[in-house]
Amino acid sequence: MENSPEKLLQVEDLSVEFKEGEHCIQAVRGISYTLFKGETLALVGESGSGKSVSALSILKLLPYPKASHPSGKILYKNQDLLHCSEKDLRKIRGNKISVIFQEPMTSLNPLHTVEKQICEVLELHQGLRKNAATQNCLELLERVGIPNAKQRMKAYPHELSGGQRQRVMIAMALASEPEILIADEPTTALDVTIQLQILELLSSLQKQLQLSILLITHDLGLVKHFSQRVAVMKEGKIVETGTTEQVLSQPQHEYTRSLINASPKPLSNAQAVFDEELIQAKNVKVWFPLKKGLLNRTYDYVKAVDGISFTLHKGQTIGIVGESGSGKTTLGLALAKLLHFEGEVSYRKQRLDTLNQKQFRPYRKKIQMVFQDPFGSLSPRMSIAEIVGEGLEIHSELQGPEKLEAIKEALLNVGLNEEVLNRYPHEFSGGQRQRIAIARALVLNPEVIIFDEPTSALDRSVQVQVVELLQSLQKKFQLAYLFISHDLSVIKALSHEIIVMKDGVVLEKNNTAAIFESPQNPYTQALINAAFDRP
């Protein structure tokens, strides 16, 4: 008879409440699951389902006393962590159970080098002296696949790419050789190819170190290939649990089925012919000079965008695809004249590249931009009415009731009613904030909207809603979109034509069907395989 696997962590009837003044929010409602030695258990669900809150409870990382546990036990090797002393918990945090957080840029200290941050963990938890800690730090960075690890030790977080920062976080989490790794959305903001590398890295480290991983995610593609068991969460409860194969091939709960089926539906007019030309870009270049020496002489350039040309028509979407650092966003900022560029850009045959900012102002209302992170681009001190109406003050004559009507109409077009007018950005979910950002662009009746990764941080079901919204707005107002993204399922659903970028140049350009059915460039093939056929 085979030995049954060792139970490393048992969560029993766990509840979490948050007190907000007189209000009490039940974030987690009596959930139970077991994590076995050497396995990956995925906690799956949309934002607000209680996944992260339940995982942070394991090491008591919630804002106590505002947070409390009306019921439950969290047993690590039969020791109840909820009732441990702070002293005992410190021995377990980082040493036995480590966490990789969602956004490495906010988890890493911007003022310290990578070496200092990893060595701090080694000195604190392992008791290593400086030289031994430095040597160990180098080995960890090499193990997690950081190129030129010796040089990178001296780098600060802002000098690393998103994928490299996530690798540093993994190195820090593994520094004290834990038994359990809690990975909280570890790949959300990363490109598909980098996501794949990070997950393969975690998978190989798991085999080497016999790690148990609690993977928190809303991406079922990751779950399918990188976990053995799944627990599906909705509104603070676990609604379904089982082996990954069982849950994904024969889901029992309606919510699980809706998560599995949530993927953006492609355009019905993907092969449409467009004849009214709006934007023409010819040989657009954005080069950033690299300077050194006392005289600050330019010795080279970073060629972020290097000679790109395309034509965007009324009612058409051009998708721009590529991994971080490929120049996608730089191109978008240049077209919105938010960056200096060389080359020709025309709007309705009017040259824009020769205009200064004052001359360009009348065109701003026709060419709008929606940014990646709505929370970062919406002022937290302004009400929704002020945010959406801000552009009208500069670009229109509307006053009083007429202005208010225009704001209401823009909100209505994105599926929000007038009740939101006097509320503030922090009161909304990610998907709602993105709708507000779209309303802010729409209120000026633009012809072109440049979208920079507008769905990258959203759950799949919310992404579907945003994609459907953009499709209906395009149909209603004949809008032209330049859609920048690394999410190929969203690009496929929205785009009529696709430009694939790498290192500032175009590798491939074609209509959507041709790109997905017969990609010509090996890089495009790798992107599509990483997105749809994760090994």
Image: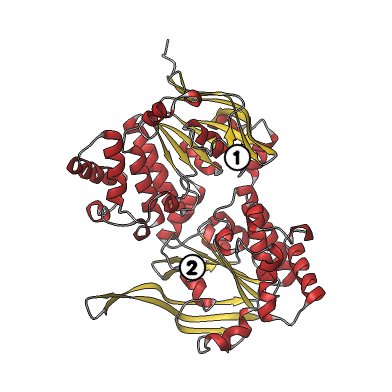
| Residue 404 placement: quadrant | bottom right
Q: Amino acid at mark 2?
A: Thr
- Kindly state the secondary structure of the residue where label 1 is placed: loop
Identified at 17% across, 43% down, the residue is 131
Whether residue 264 is visible, yes or no, is no
Judging depth in this view, the residue of 24 and 4 nearest the camera is 24
User: Which residue is the site of mark 2?
Assistant: 329
| Residue 372 placement: quadrant | bottom right
Judging depth in this view, the residue of 157 and 282 nearest the camera is 157
Q: Quadrant of the N terminus?
A: top left
Q: Up-down: is 258 above or below 241? A: below
Tell me how far mark 2 sits from mark 1, CA to CA.
30 Å
- Kindly state the secondary structure of the residue where label 2 is placed: helix
Q: Up-down: is 235 above or below 369? A: above
User: Which residue is the site of mark 1?
Assistant: 45
Q: Is residue 526 left or right of residue 16?
A: left
Identified at 72% across, 61% down, the residue is 414
Question: From this viewpoint, which residue is outermost toward the top?
Answer: 1
Colouring: secondary structure
Across and down, in percent, residue 360 comes to 57, 85
